[in-house]
Amino acid sequence: MERERIISFLIQLVVFLIMLVLQISFLSNFNLYIRSFNLILVILVFLVLLVDPVRYLGFAVIAGLLFDMHSGLSFGVFMVTFLVTAVAIGILSENMFTNRSLYSLLVLGVIASVVYDLIFLLVVGLIYLVGASEIFVSGQFWQSILFQAINSVILVAVGFWLVNKFSNKFKPTFLRS
């Protein structure tokens, strides 16, 4: 049992690192639409629904830390952004979107995208107002939010199909009497 958990964790870690490298080094070199695919955010949405809170919050902190190390922004911007997004999606999935259907997952994906971008804007704006950084968002930020929401819906739909194809995590279970 313990060996299976370790192997599962290592597989998840390798998948996470591959997605992170793909996000940071590959997708960021394309046009605005392709660049707005946020693979890590979509993985975070799935993790909120599939694993315990300690694991998805740890994922959010590590993802934020790795994004912060690559970013030219002030350190902690992405860590705070991912962490607040994970907490918001966790609260919503526990209290409002308890049905693990495609529709609730799509709505959570869009909400995660919007919350992520708004928290990012808020944190960067506060850092800019304090004078700790001269970097602020570009004029294409609002278009990027729209593209990211659309791309999140696409990726969540594909991810939902893959999870249903290879596991029974989202399949309905009925009570037997």
Image (cartoon, rainbow, N blue to C red):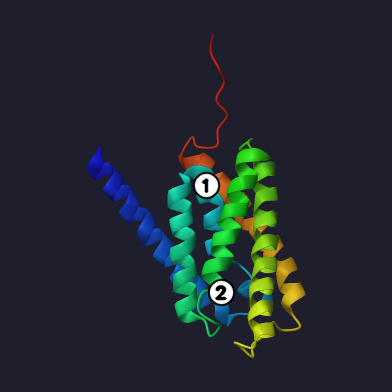
Rendered residue at 43%/51% (across/down) = 55
Rendered residue at 65%/84% (across/down) = 130
- Circles 2 and 1: CB atoms closer than 8 Å: no
Q: Residue furthest top?
A: 177
Q: In whole angstroms, how far apart are the C-alphas of marks 2 and 1? A: 31 Å
Residue 4 is drawn in which quadrant? top left
139 relative position to 93: left or right: right
| Three-letter residue code for mark 2 | Val
Rendered residue at 46%/44% (across/down) = 52
| Three-letter residue code for mark 1 | Leu
Q: Along the polypeptide, which appears first: circle 2 or circle 1? A: 2
For the question of whether residue 81 can be seen, the reply is yes
Q: Secondary structure at mark 2?
A: helix
Residue 85's x, y, as percent? 60, 59
Residue 35's x, y, as percent? 61, 75
103 relative position to 12: left or right: right
Q: Quadrant of the N terminus?
A: top left
Q: Secondary structure at mark 1?
A: helix
